[in-house]
Image: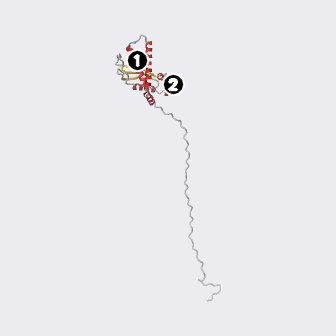
Amino acid sequence: AVVSPGKTIAGSAKTAPSRRISPPVKEEKPVIIGKRVIERETPKKENPEKKVEKPKVDASKLIDQAISKIERKVQTEKKDHLSSALSKIQSQVEKTEKENPQGDLSETGISIRLYQMEVAERIKQNWSYPMAISNPGEYQAIEAVVVVTVRENGTIIRFSVKKKSSSTLFDASVLKAIERSDPLPPFPEGYRKSTDDIEIRFNLSDMETS
């Protein structure tokens, strides 16, 4: 069949290829990585300088340490101390004779006096006091008087403070010395008492010169 110009035959025209519609592209949201917050350590303020407190002095330990020094003395030092003690006793006896020319100068009276002095010296050998914690200006003021009751065999029955010093530590050191001196030497021959009360005076000036 003749086709007139300008006319098209239905179905003969080429159809344009259909376009494939791609699905919409999803926009990927940017992944936000959580920031790790690093806390900076703020420099600690240094504590203000504290006053350094001096360690408390244990008074009883000081006394024990001082007494232990006596126990560590060598034999030669003990002999020197004994000779010094005997010299003191002799000088005190001579002083007593001068002060009491009409007093009891019998052999018994002298032996009793010598024994009492020996007891005092024996106890003072076992006595020690930490001079480092004392004020030198108080040496004359610190003094204690004790009475020691002794049995004829030298056993100490009791003791008491007749006159307290101004320092409880000083008084405690004196009582410790008495405890460490028990038993004392027995009574000498001619001592007619079964017990005797012996008064002993303790002061720092004597310790300093001993």
Q: Residue at x 51, y 24 (%)?
A: 136
Give the left or right position of residue 18, taking residue 203 as reference: right
Quadrant of residue 103 within the rendered picture: top left
Q: Distance between the residues labelled 2 and 1?
A: 32 Å
CB under 8 Å between discs 2 and 1: no
User: Percent x, y for residue 192?
Assistant: 34, 16
In front here: 48 or 66? 66
Identify the element where label 1 is drawn.
helix
Foreground residue among 122 and 177: 122
**The N terminus sits in image quarter:** bottom right
Scheme of colours in the image: secondary structure
* Image x and y of residue 94, in percent: 44, 14
Which residue is under mark 2? 136
In-front residue for pair 149/70 = 70
Label ID, residue 114 = 1
Mark 2 residue crowding within 10 angstroms, few (<14) / some (14–19) / many (20+): few
* Nearest-to-viewer mark from 2 and 1: 1
Examine the rendering and report whether any part of residue 161 can be seen.
no
Q: Which amino acid does label 2 sit on?
A: Pro
Q: Where is residue 91 in the image (x, y as percent from the top left)?
A: 45, 16
For badge 1, the amino acid type reads Leu
Seen as rendered, the residue at the extreme top is: 102
